[in-house]
Image (cartoon, rainbow, N blue to C red):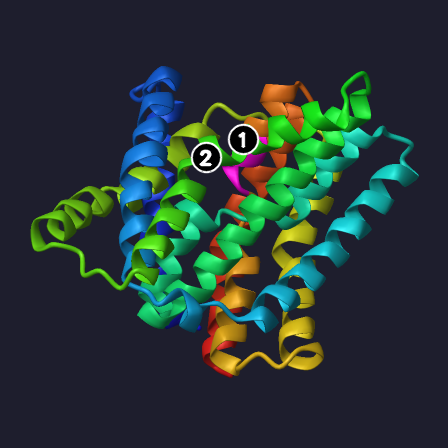
């Protein structure tokens, strides 16, 4: 277990470095925004395209993996929604809280870390999970928020969701990459080298940006944030373990990758959605802050258990 912790520590150390730079004002909020934009639109997109373009989609796609992940994530999503409704809050806030309970930082943290710790074979399952989060649950939260506000027709809501999917560079890069792979075209050497160099900036840039962005987040409504962090770090991976190992026929290695991905802390893009729609951004920021801090230990523990069988 100590060996796994020491392997994950450098990733969280870079997050800590970014956090320190942000707290001391050396790296301003404006600088963090531009670094995040570079990683999101360029470096991470290059990494995801290169990874997916070098995979065979029909070998990677596994309906059992998608169903197992969807079943577990939906169960925790509904649990978080029920708890939110029990506090008599509206649909919009419940949707944001449920998003915190199940959407992990797979893109910025999971892709580079799990690929390094669990091997290159982890790329396929991680990409499937990332695509499911973005397409299914990323669309769902927008539908619930815009639908809950009323005054908008179905066509307007669907158009909003469609524009959001098309404008998301992670979705676009994955789709284009799998499309390239489906054509079975080899990536030309100069293009592959270009993608490798640009994508190489994704890991340190993303981790540093995560830390710097946490420096500007406040820890309010700690009881709620603690509950949502518990859902994300404990209940979500436990549910994925149940569905992937018992309910559905997923091989143990792939199930281990899925469980590890589900154990990641709350994703930063949930805050972007909350801030964009003006729905409980402080609650989300506290959940990101707490779950990221605690995940230094819990992610190592989960990956250690997975690798230990």
Answer whether residue 92 is magenta in the image: no
Disc sitting over residue 168 in the figure: 2
Q: Which residue is drawn at 58% across and 41% down?
A: 290
Disc sitting over residue 164 in the figure: 1
252 with respect to 76 (left or right): left
Q: Against 196, is 258 above or below? A: below
Mark 1 burial class by Cα count in 10 Å: few <14, some 14-19, many 20+? some
For the residues bearing labels 2 and 1, Cβ distance under 8 angstroms: yes
Mark 2 burial class by Cα count in 10 Å: few <14, some 14-19, many 20+? some
Q: Against 138, is 22 above or below? A: above
35 with respect to 106 (left or right): left
- Tell me the element at label 1: helix
**Separation (CA) of disc 2 from disc 1:** 6 Å
Secondary structure mostly seen in magenta is helix
Q: Across the whole image, how many numbered discs are drawn on residues?
A: 2
Q: Looking at the rendering, which quadrant does residue 272 occupy?
A: top right
Query: Which residue range is magenta in the image?
Result: 267-271
Disc sitting over residue 279 in the figure: none
* Res 220 seen here: no
């Amino acid at each position: 277990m100590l060996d796994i912790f020491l392997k994950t520590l450098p990733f969280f150390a870079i997050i800590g470095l970014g956090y320190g730079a942000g707290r001391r004002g050396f790296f301003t909020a404006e600088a963090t925004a531009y670094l995040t934009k570079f990683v999101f639109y360029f470096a991470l997109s290059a990494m995801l395209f290169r990874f997916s373009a070098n995979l065979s989609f029909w070998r990677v796609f596994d309906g059992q993996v998608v169903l197992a992940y969807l079943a577990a994530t939906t169960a925790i999503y509904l649990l978080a929604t029920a708890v939110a409704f029990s506090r008599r809050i509206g649909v919009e806030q419940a949707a944001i809280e449920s998003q915190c309970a199940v959407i992990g930082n797979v893109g910025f943290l999971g892709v580079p870390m799990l690929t390094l710790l669990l091997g290159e074979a982890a790329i396929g399952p991680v990409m499937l999970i990332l695509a499911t989060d973005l397409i299914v649950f990323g669309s769902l939260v927008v539908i619930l928020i815009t639908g809950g506000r009323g005054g908008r027709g179905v066509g307007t809501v669907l158009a909003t969701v469609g524009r959001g999917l098309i404008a998301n560079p992670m979705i676009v890069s994955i789709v284009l990459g799998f499309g390239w792979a489906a054509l079975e075209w080899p990536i030309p050497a100069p293009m592959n080298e270009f993608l490798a160099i640009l994508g190489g900036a994704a890991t340190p840039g993303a981790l540093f940006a995560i830390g710097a962005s946490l420096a500007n987040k406040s820890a309010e409504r700690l009881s709620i944030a603690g509950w949502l962090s518990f859902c994300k770090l404990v209940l979500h991976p436990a549910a994925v373990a149940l569905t992937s190992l018992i309910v559905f026929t997923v091989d143990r290695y792939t199930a281990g990758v899925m469980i590890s991905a589900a154990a990641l802390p709350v994703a930063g893009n949930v805050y972007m959605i909350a801030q964009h729609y003006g729905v409980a951004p402080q609650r989300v920021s506290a959940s990101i802050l707490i779950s990221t801090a605690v995940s230094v230990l819990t992610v190592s523990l989960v990956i250690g258990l997975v690798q230990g069988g």
